[in-house]
Amino acid sequence: MRTRPTARILHGITMLLSVIIPVRNAEGPLLKTLDSLKAADPLAEWLEIIVQDGGEIETSPTDQRIKRYRETDSGIYDAMNKGRSKATGRWLMFAGAGDEWIGGSDIRAKLENAFAPLQVFAVELKPPLEPGVRRHYPARWDASMIWRNSVHHQGVCYRADVLPSRPFETEYKVLSDYALHLRFFRNDMKAEVHKTPMMQVASGGISRQFTWQLYQEELRLKRQVLGPVRGAIQWPWICAKWLYKRIAQSHHR
């Protein structure tokens, strides 16, 4: 008979989900994220909120339900790794400052009854939308991931026992979450896919700045994760994606 993984205990309370938020000098957007999470769990019964703060600006104390750690970091993925090391929930997810929880109580029910180690949800993107970017991204866990970064980390809940202590490779500055998801997919990690949107993602994220450097990083990680032959096949596809974004940007002006 299958059994669910044992939840770790925080101050005598079983925490179902740890939400890890890396932030640097973005107090206003962070407060929007925190308010949305506190509204999702007014009594702090099942959400652990961890703010990994690498900023230089002194901030005022926050709600006692929020664990805030001030440490220097080498970038967003290093901060996410630091936050992961402090999480105590059965499930973990990562949000950015300015993202807002829209999942409601449905997410709690789905996690309480979940068995697959990854739970993938849809996400909504906040305006303004960059050229060529859609507002709604459905949840996916299929071969499309080999060609496109179609799984947003704000839409994934990772079971704690399958997430390494430092899951994000800091050699990738923009697409380390994509590299993690590709590795999981290539290793046949099972995922349950849900139509329910979990987060509304703020605009201006680093993976939505469609520079040539972004596509160079994508090619590099695919060569590493997929192997040199399959990685090389990606080259014309990545060039076509970059060209499409350039055309979309020029028409938007």
Image: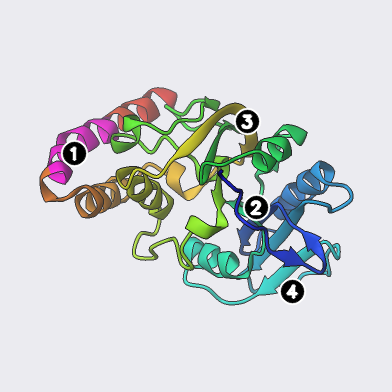
Q: Position of residue 178 (x, y in %)?
A: 39, 47
**Residues in magenta?**
230-243
Labelled disc at residue 58: 4
Q: Is residue 35 left or right of residue 92?
A: right
- Name the residue furthest left: 229
Comparing 25 with 229, the one in front is 229
Point out the frontmost of discs 2 and 1: 1
- Disc with the residue nearer the chain's start (3 vs 2): 2
Comparing 217 with 151, the one in front is 151
Q: Which residue is mark 2?
A: 97
Q: Which residue is mark 3?
A: 197
Whether residues under marks 4 and 3 lie with C-beta atoms below 8 angstroms apart, the answer is no
Disc 1 from disc 3: Cα separation: 30 Å
Q: Secondary structure at mark 2?
A: loop
Whether residues under marks 4 and 1 lie with C-beta atoms below 8 angstroms apart, the answer is no
Point out the frontmost of discs 2 and 4: 2
Comparing 6 with 133, the one in front is 6
Kind of residue at disc 3: Pro
Q: Is residue 225 left or right of residue 76?
A: left
Secondary structure mostly seen in the magenta stretch: helix
138, above or below 221, in the image = above
Q: Position of residue 73 (x, y in %)?
A: 52, 73
Point out the frontmost of discs 4 and 3: 3
Q: Dot 3 surroundings within 10 Å: few (below 14), some, or many (20 or more)? A: many
User: Which image quadrant: the C terminus?
Assistant: top left
Magenta-colored stretch includes residue 235: yes
Q: Secondary structure at mark 1?
A: helix
Q: Dot 1 surroundings within 10 Å: few (below 14), some, or many (20 or more)? A: some
